[in-house]
Image (spheres, rainbow, N blue to C red):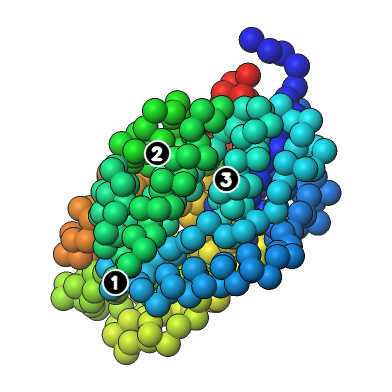
């Protein structure tokens, strides 16, 4: 096995804007800390990190630009009601194969590259002959355009007659998938997925099924996301120390796959329990919302505190630490950073059994997992966490120990380094 350090280039559309970007940047930090020569190349740079290179794309060809606009308009005007999650056509992008650092790299690690890298750009990267590792953060790399399939499995075949597009006279997803197959043919490519669920999907796909696929979870800086006293954390947010606090995040709250209507319905179910209702009416239970402030959440029966977007990890740590539980009602998801962050702060998770959630959350050990979309069982799980304070405290310790043991930056970086070697 090689013992010298690799020159690694990580490519993502942004460095810290969005869940995939945060996950990619944390990997970059982890690799750097164990001595690897890692650089990150992005379209949108949000940090001041000098090891992150901003290489925005420019479209000089008016025809190419018009084609991009036409295709994006075509997609948006032909969406069905099945899903409102992102659906991407491979936009024109920046040819990163021309950058000297990329040309001299030992490993190219792709992450979330939509709206940055076109299929032609990928073809040029593969032509360099450098081993490419593609870390998947959703299903787009092996579909004809959707980022989450809403239960469709046509990616296993040809993506024809896509259920997310209506009156699609060009059968666009099928054509895109064929072009992806042409670009990836004979590519020196290895696939990494953060979750077992996404690995299974990739393995079953017509595009990636014959490539090597390895599962390496996302990571978190366990020295930043650490538990602090719940009473101290609550005080900083303006919540009384004896208040049972239920935390959730509301980024893109109206997206169907985020499941926030299911969460609200589960909370309303909890109110049918007399003891829980008494706690709410006496101010002993609060819902704490990070992210989008949205009037759709306002309800006289829901004791909601909206604290908006938290841009610092210190503020996030306080919010997670202030909560008795973190509820993730997603109906489709990969391996959410929010679960890692909550558990690293010693906060148990209540979630649906979807995607990568069961990879991290062990039922009745580090939280509660219930069948996808079952609002009643989600409500029962919340009630269980409210009532069983001793069990909840045991879960808090298990959460922290599990994340420190399995999801540190160093552990993830070492797994990637072993793969790269």
The residue indicated by pointer 3 is 111
Give the SS element for disc 2: loop
Q: Nearer the viewer, residue 297 or 284?
A: 297
Q: Residue at x 56, y 48 (%)?
A: 119
Q: Is residue 373 left or right of residue 283?
A: left
Determine whether 231 is above or below 277 in the image.
above
Q: Residue at x 78, y 50 (%)?
A: 53
Q: Mark 1 or mark 2: name the one nearer the start of the chain.
A: 1
Q: Is residue 189 left or right of residue 6?
A: left
The residue indicated by pointer 2 is 207
Please state the horizontal and vertical placement of residue 370, each as a whole percent of the image.
23, 53
Determine whether 375 is above or below 201 in the image.
below
The residue indicated by pointer 1 is 167
Q: Residue at x 51, y 28 (%)?
A: 186
Disc number for residue 344: none
From this viewpoint, is residue 30 visible?
no
Give the SS element for disc 3: loop
From this viewpoint, is residue 95 visible?
yes
Q: Quadrant of residue 212?
A: top left
| Spatial separation of the CA atoms under disc 1 and disc 3 | 32 Å
At label 2, counting other C-alpha atoms closer than 10 Å, the crowd grade (few under 14, some 14-19, many 20 or more) is: many
Q: Quadrant of the N terminus?
A: top right
Give the SS element for disc 1: loop
Q: Mark 1 or mark 3: name the one nearer the start of the chain.
A: 3
- Confirm or deny contact between disc 1 and disc 3 (CB under 8 A): no
- Confirm or deny contact between disc 1 and disc 2 (CB under 8 A): no
Please state the horizontal and vertical placement of residue 192, each as a whole percent of the image.
49, 34
């Amino acid at each position: 096995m090689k013992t010298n350090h690799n020159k690694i280039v990580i490519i993502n559309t942004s460095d810290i804007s969005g869940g995939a970007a945060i996950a990619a940047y944390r990997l970059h930090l982890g690799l750097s800390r164990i001595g690897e020569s890692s650089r990150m190349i992005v379209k949108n740079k949000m940090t001041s990190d000098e090891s992150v290179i901003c290489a925005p794309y420019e479209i000089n060809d008016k025809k190419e630009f018009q084609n991009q606009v036409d295709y994006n308009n075509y997609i948006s005007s032909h969406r069905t009601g099945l899903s409102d999650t992102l659906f991407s056509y491979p936009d024109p992008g920046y040819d990163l194969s021309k950058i000297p650092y990329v040309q001299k790299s030992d490993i190219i690690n792709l992450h979330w590259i939509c709206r940055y890298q076109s299929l032609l750009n990928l073809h040029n990267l593969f032509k360099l002959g450098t081993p490419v590792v593609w870390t998947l953060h959703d299903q787009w790399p092996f579909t004809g355009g959707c980022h989450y399939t809403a239960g469709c499995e046509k990616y296993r075949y040809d993506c024809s007659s896509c259920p997310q597009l209506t009156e699609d006279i060009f059968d666009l997803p099928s054509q895109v998938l064929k072009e992806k197959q042409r670009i990836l043919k004979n590519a020196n490519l290895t696939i990494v997925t953060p979750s077992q669920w996404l690995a299974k999907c990739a393995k079953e796909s017509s595009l990636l099924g014959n490539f090597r696929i390895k599962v390496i979870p996302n990571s978190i800086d366990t020295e930043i996301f650490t538990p602090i006293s719940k009473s101290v954390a609550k005080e900083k947010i303006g919540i009384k120390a004896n208040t049972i606090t239920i935390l959730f995040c509301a980024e893109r709250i109206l997206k169907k796959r985020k499941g926030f209507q299911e969460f609200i319905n589960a909370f309303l179910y909890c109110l049918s329990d007399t003891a829980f209702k008494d706690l709410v009416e006496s101010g002993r239970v609060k819902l704490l919302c990070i992210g989008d402030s949205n009037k759709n959440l306002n309800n006289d029966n829901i004791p909601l505190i909206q604290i908006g977007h938290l841009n610092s990890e210190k503020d996030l740590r306080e919010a997670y630490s202030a909560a008795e539980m973190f509820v993730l009602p997603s109906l489709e998801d990969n391996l959410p950073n929010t679960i890692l962050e909550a558990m690293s702060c010693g906060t148990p998770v209540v979630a649906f059994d979807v995607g990568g959630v069961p990879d991290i959350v062990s039922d009745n050990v580090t939280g509660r997992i219930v069948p996808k979309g079952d609002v009643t069982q989600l409500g029962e799980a919340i009630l269980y966490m409210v009532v069983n304070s001793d069990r909840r405290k045991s879960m808090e310790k298990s959460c922290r120990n599990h994340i420190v043991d399995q999801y540190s930056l160093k552990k993830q970086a070492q797994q990637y380094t072993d793969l790269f070697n």
